[in-house]
Image: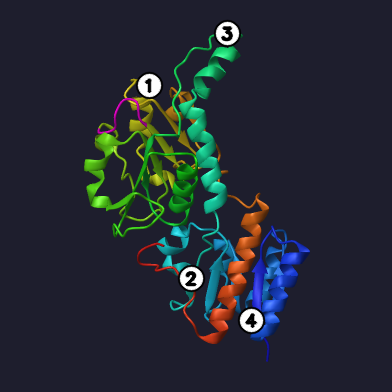
Amino acid sequence: MSRDICVYLEFLTEGHKAQIRDAARRTGFVPHFFTLDQFEEAKACLQHCEVLYAHSADLLRTAPASLRWYCCSFAGVDLYCKDPALFANPDCLLTNSNVYGVTIAEHVVMVTLMLLRRMPEYAVIMGQRSWSNQLPVRSIRDNEFTILGTGDIGRNVAERLRGMGAAKITGLSRSGRPHPAFDEVRPISDLDDVLPRTKILVMALPSTPDTIHILNRERIALLPADAYVINVGRGTALDQTALAEALNGGELAGAALDVMDPEPLPKDDPLWDARNIILTPHVSGNMTLGYTCDENVARFCADLENYAAGRPLAGLVDRALGY
């Protein structure tokens, strides 16, 4: 009797499918591929599958108790951790795909340079068909950064900033465990001590009960007036109303948000009109970079080998912690 895998994804090339078939053949599995317009077909197939590789709460909700492993193709799995009813089998393994560090780090570098080189303000000047070119700019070189979250995204951001000459990079994590990508790593409990000395704050946190509004009104007030805030983690980590007020009041130099709460951002939200802000519609990750897609499939295949051999899964998520 075959052991079946339901694959319900939109980004796979024929090469990716061949890679999955090869890994499945080596491990005694049979993959079945479906695109996003084949929900009913995928749902029918899933009823006899042991493994699901997808990013669909709706499809997962239809899975029987015989599903033993759900590999989410996204990095953020807060949705699946908040709602245990999604899993008919409470012991079903959950893994995520932490492969977005490269593309998100490049996005962070882009918006950091835009802020430091005053692009939101120059966009206004040029939009008025004016010609003022003497705004003082700052550089990544010799600057100091604080990165809130030292996982795959935070480390990739730190490595690229280091390559561009950043003077000091401080990471904050739940454990405070050191990592060579950072000059120092401190526990998140030290956040109030770090913020007053922060010039550029990069937020790369998952959504958990502990991270909701971790950058609240009081902590925004601790940042220097010339500081920038960049959020590429989850929108729930930031008090957006307080941020907009701080920007408009000149209490912060600028911000760049790729994640917001809620998404899509309501048309009447004050963030749209905030001073010196760059807003992007959750595009820093996505599956638009070929490298991201290739790594996604490669890691699924590697964990399929682990799963078949009874070894721990590299991408295993602790549902209680949310990551």
* CA gap, disc 1 and disc 4: 56 Å
Query: Which of disc 4 and disc 3 is earlier in sequence?
Result: 4
Which SS class for mark 3? Answer: loop
Which SS class for mark 1? Answer: helix
Q: What amino acid is at disc 4?
A: His
* Image quarter in which the C terminus is found: bottom left
Q: Which residue is rendered at x = 39% and y = 56% of the image?
A: 180
Magenta region includes residue 226: yes
Query: Which of disc 2 and disc 4 is earlier in sequence?
Result: 4
Q: In which quarter of the view is residue 2 placed?
A: bottom right
Q: Which residue is mark 1?
A: 248
* Image quarter in which the N terminus is found: bottom right
Q: Which residue is rendered at x = 65% and y = 77% of the image?
A: 5
Q: Which residue is mark 4?
A: 48
Indicate the position of residue 139 as horizontal and vertical percent values: 45, 30
Q: Which residue is mark 3?
A: 131
Q: What amino acid is at disc 3?
A: Trp
